[in-house]
Amino acid sequence: MAVLCSEVGVSVRTIQRVFRKEIGIDFESWRRQVRLTKAVELLVSGCSIKEVAHKVGYCQPSAFVEMFRRTFGTTPKAWMSALENRGQ
């Protein structure tokens, strides 16, 4: 974000303020929600946890798993298992 802001001549803080006002949440929370939404889509389509982690921008799958667990209260593997059991 800092690079983009400097390219257009505006401060990061200004963009953060406008983003919160227009969207209703801060940029980092919004970005996390977008990444999780895409992650769920990829998991349901059959991608591995490692693939999903990398596709949504995590260098380490363990960091992705931790973020997923903090948000959903379970790991991606357990979440997928519950989803599969529900469909049977």
Image (cartoon, helix red, strand yellow):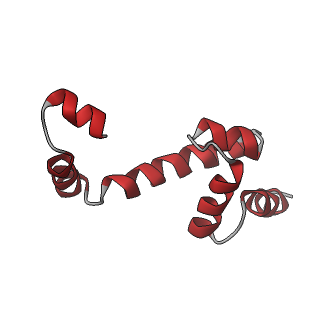
Residue most extreme to the top: 7
Q: Residue at x 21, y 27 (%)?
A: 7
Q: Residue at x 39, y 58 (%)?
A: 29
Residue 40 location (% of width, % of height): 63, 49
8 or 26: nearer the viewer: 8
Q: Residue at x 63, y 53 (%)?
A: 64
Which quadrant does the N terminus fall into?
top left
Q: Please state if 35 lies on the left or on the right of 64 as rendered.
A: left
75 or 64: nearer the viewer: 64
Q: Residue at x 61, y 46 (%)?
A: 39
Compared to 61, does 26 lie above or below? Answer: below
Which quadrant does the C terminus fall into?
bottom right
Query: In terms of image quadrants, where is residue 48?
Result: top right
Query: In terms of image quadrants, where is residue 70?
Result: bottom right
Q: Please state if 49 lies on the left or on the right of 13 as rendered.
A: right
The number of callouts visible is: 0
Query: In terms of image quadrants, where is residue 65?
Result: bottom right
Residue 75 location (% of width, % of height): 72, 63
12 or 28: nearer the viewer: 12
Residue 10 location (% of width, % of height): 13, 38
Compared to 88, does 35 lie above or below? Answer: above
Q: Please state if 33 lies on the left or on the right of 18 as rendered.
A: right
